[in-house]
């Protein structure tokens, strides 16, 4: 009986130590989560305004005049996989990899950001062209190298479409694994854009659309803004992925801490029952011995 109580005490101590570790990881993740969420949400108003400007310009130009708007038959596509470097973030990567697993392996090439994504692509035997390591708090310049690589592949004709597989951040508890097209750029890829501008509402003699005046022309503005739009959209997806990662890790560590505390309670209750049974047995033995001596 003593050995049994000793084992339970060891288990209680072990679980308490685990709870301390998960609690510390939860606090660290919560701190990083706040910063990452602020970064992701702060960039969205700018992205929405950029979308509106792009739609206004896109309505007045011929898609064939700019290579980033050229729609081609998809014989080969490039997918940018944005995952995490570390685990302990619940089903975040699993849900994302499930979306990627449904893609046609024969005509899909990959660019990865995050060690978990690289490991998944290696295990599944998929074609990995490049691996970009990003900082925990990535800047626009950090992600630009990855988006520039993808844009060069599209402009050279090596791939006919570029998509990004990432986790879209909605809120701390809602994280959506998504695969979104970034090239070729089309109105369907401009979320939140205002498509109410028509030819009838704008003067025919001026480069005005949606209240914007474009100088020297809409075509020149498009040449300058489209590459930047692609860079910024991929950067926004990287920020969403980071916010999703820290949110998922915070929730996972909180759940682990709560489970550990509950397990300690259950083990303590079991320990008390075993100890009480041991004491009762000893009392009975003493009483029996005393009765036998009378």
Image (spheres, rainbow, N blue to C red):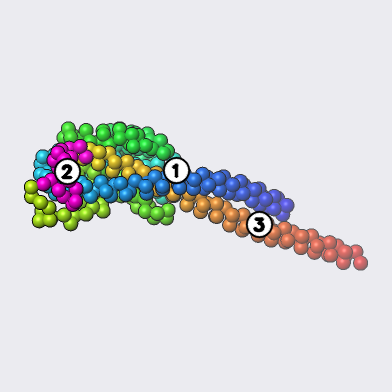
In this rendering, position of residue 220 left or right of residue 26: left
The C terminus: image quadrant: bottom right
For discs 2 and 3, the disc positioned in front in the rendered view: 2
- Residue where numbered disc 2 is placed: 214
Mark 2 or mark 1, which is nearer the start of the sequence? 1
User: For the residue carrying disc 2, how many other residues have a C-alpha within 10 Å: few (<14), some (14-19), or many (20+)?
Assistant: some
- Residue where numbered disc 1 is placed: 87
For discs 1 and 3, the disc positioned in front in the rendered view: 1
For discs 1 and 2, the disc positioned in front in the rendered view: 2
Residue 33, image x and y in percent?
Answer: 45, 47
The residue depicted at 47 percent of the width and 44 percent of the height is 32
Mark 3 or mark 2, which is nearer the start of the sequence? 2
The residue depicted at 67 percent of the width and 50 percent of the height is 9
Query: The residue tagged with tag 3: helix, strand or loop?
Result: helix
Q: What stretch is highlighted in magenta?
A: 206-225
In this rendering, position of residue 216 left or right of residue 112: left
Query: The residue tagged with tag 1: helix, strand or loop?
Result: loop
- Residue where numbered disc 3 is placed: 268
Residue 133, image x and y in percent?
Answer: 37, 34
Residue found at the far left of this picture: 205
The N terminus: image quadrant: bottom right
Asked whether 185 or 76 is in front, the reply is 185
Residue 29: numbered disc: none
> What distance separates the C-alpha of mark 1 from that of mark 3?
31 Å
The residue depicted at 35 percent of the width and 34 percent of the height is 142
Instruction: Say if the magenta span includes residue 218.
Output: yes
- The answer to whether any part of residue 122 appears in the image is no
Asked whether 276 or 136 is in front, the reply is 136
Query: The residue tagged with tag 2: helix, strand or loop?
Result: loop
User: For the residue carrying disc 3, how many other residues have a C-alpha within 10 Å: few (<14), some (14-19), or many (20+)?
Assistant: some
- The answer to whether any part of residue 247 appears in the image is yes
Residue 106, image x and y in percent?
Answer: 22, 40
């Amino acid at each position: 009986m003593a050995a049994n109580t000793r084992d339970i005490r060891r288990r209680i101590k072990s679980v308490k130590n685990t709870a301390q570790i998960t609690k510390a990881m939860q606090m660290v993740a919560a701190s990083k989560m706040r910063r990452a969420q602020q970064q992701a949400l702060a960039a969205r108003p700018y992205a929405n305004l950029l979308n509106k400007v792009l739609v206004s310009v896109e309505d007045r130009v011929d898609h064939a005049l700019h290579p980033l708007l050229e729609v081609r038959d998809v014989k080969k596509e490039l997918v940018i996989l944005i995952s995490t470097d570390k685990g302990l973030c619940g089903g975040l990567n699993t849900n994302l990899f499930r979306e990627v697993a449904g893609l046609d392996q024969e005509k899909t090439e990959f660019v990865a950001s995050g060690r978990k994504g690289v490991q998944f692509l290696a295990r599944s035997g998929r074609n990995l062209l490049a691996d970009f390591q990003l900082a925990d708090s990535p800047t626009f310049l950090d992600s630009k190298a990855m988006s520039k690589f993808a844009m060069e592949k599209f402009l050279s004709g090596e791939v006919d479409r570029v998509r990004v597989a990432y986790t879209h951040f909605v809120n701390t508890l809602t994280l959506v694994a998504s695969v979104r097209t970034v090239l070729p750029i089309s109105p369907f890829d401009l979320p939140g854009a205002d498509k109410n501008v028509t030819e009838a509402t704008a003067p025919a003699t001026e480069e005005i659309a949606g209240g914007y005046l474009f100088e020297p022309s809409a075509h020149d503005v498009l040449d300058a803004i489209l590459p930047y739009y692609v860079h910024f959209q991929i950067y926004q997806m990287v920020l969403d992925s980071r916010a999703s990662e820290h949110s998922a890790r915070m929730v996972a560590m909180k759940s682990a801490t709560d489970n550990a505390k509950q397990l300690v309670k259950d083990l303590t209750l079991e320990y008390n029952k075993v100890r009480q049974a041991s004491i009762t047995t000893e009392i009975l033995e003493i009483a029996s011995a005393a009765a036998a001596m009378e």
